Amino acid sequence: MKFIPLTICALLSTALVVYIAGVDKIDLSAGLSKEQTKQMAHYETTFRDAVMQDLEGNKHGLSSIEAPVIILNFWASWCAPCLEEMPSLVELRNQFSNEDLMIYGINSDEEDQAKKIEKTVKKFALNYKIVPDNEAVLLNKFMISSIPVTIIFVRGEVMEVSLGLKDFASEEFIQKIKSVL
């Protein structure tokens, strides 16, 4: 009778180790609803066709960017959660080179956009590309109805969609990015 609890513990421990070892091999897309799968496909199609113009006037065709990881972060200066996640985006940008990761902050302010962007860039020392979208062209193309929203692409495919506040400097997220490079 003494060996039965030990046997059960050993079996449970083995099962736990097997589960943990296999977690990173699970196909997360298998758990997506039909609606979510459709949304991901829309994001990927839009990604291939999207061309954005940053503050310096440079045009960026997303499909022509060589960095394997591209992050689109939709924000506005009046959005408190958007501003709250900016320091972690700055920290993330510092962790990776432009050859590995590109971040685009897509701003949707409508009034005094240039002034509000400039103030935000200075306040948070933003070190990634800012794309003004005051006519909501990109928001409409990507069908963004609330912010903050962040879409993370790996080689043109959606890796993750974050609705709401996200800590981009978390060890878990940084490891996730490193694992796809």
Image (cartoon, helix red, strand yellow):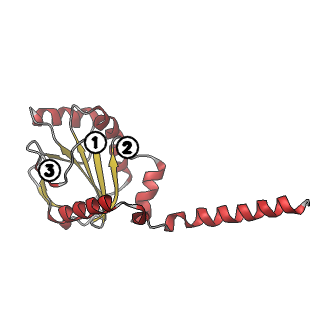
Counting other residues with Cα less than 10 Å from the Cα at mark 3, is it few (<14), some (14-19), or many (20 or more)? few
Residue at the spot x=43%, y=53% of the render? Answer: 174
Residue at the spot x=14%, y=37% of the render? Answer: 109
Counting other residues with Cα less than 10 Å from the Cα at mark 1, is it few (<14), some (14-19), or many (20 or more)? many
Residue 153 image position (x, y, % from top left) = 30, 60
Q: Is residue 30 above or below residue 110?
A: below
Secondary structure beneath label 2: loop
Q: Amino acid at mark 3?
A: Asn
Tell me whether circle 1 and circle 2 mark residues in contact (CB < 8 Å).
yes
Q: Earlier in the sequence, mark 1 or mark 3?
A: 3
**Mark whose residue sits in front, 1 or 3:** 3
Using the image as rendered, state which of residue 5 and residue 164 is in the foreground.
Answer: 5
Mark 2 = which residue?
A: 166
Mark 3 = which residue?
A: 140
- Which label number is shown at residue 148? 1
Tell me whether circle 2 and circle 3 mark residues in contact (CB < 8 Å).
no
Q: CA distance from mark 1 to mark 3?
A: 14 Å
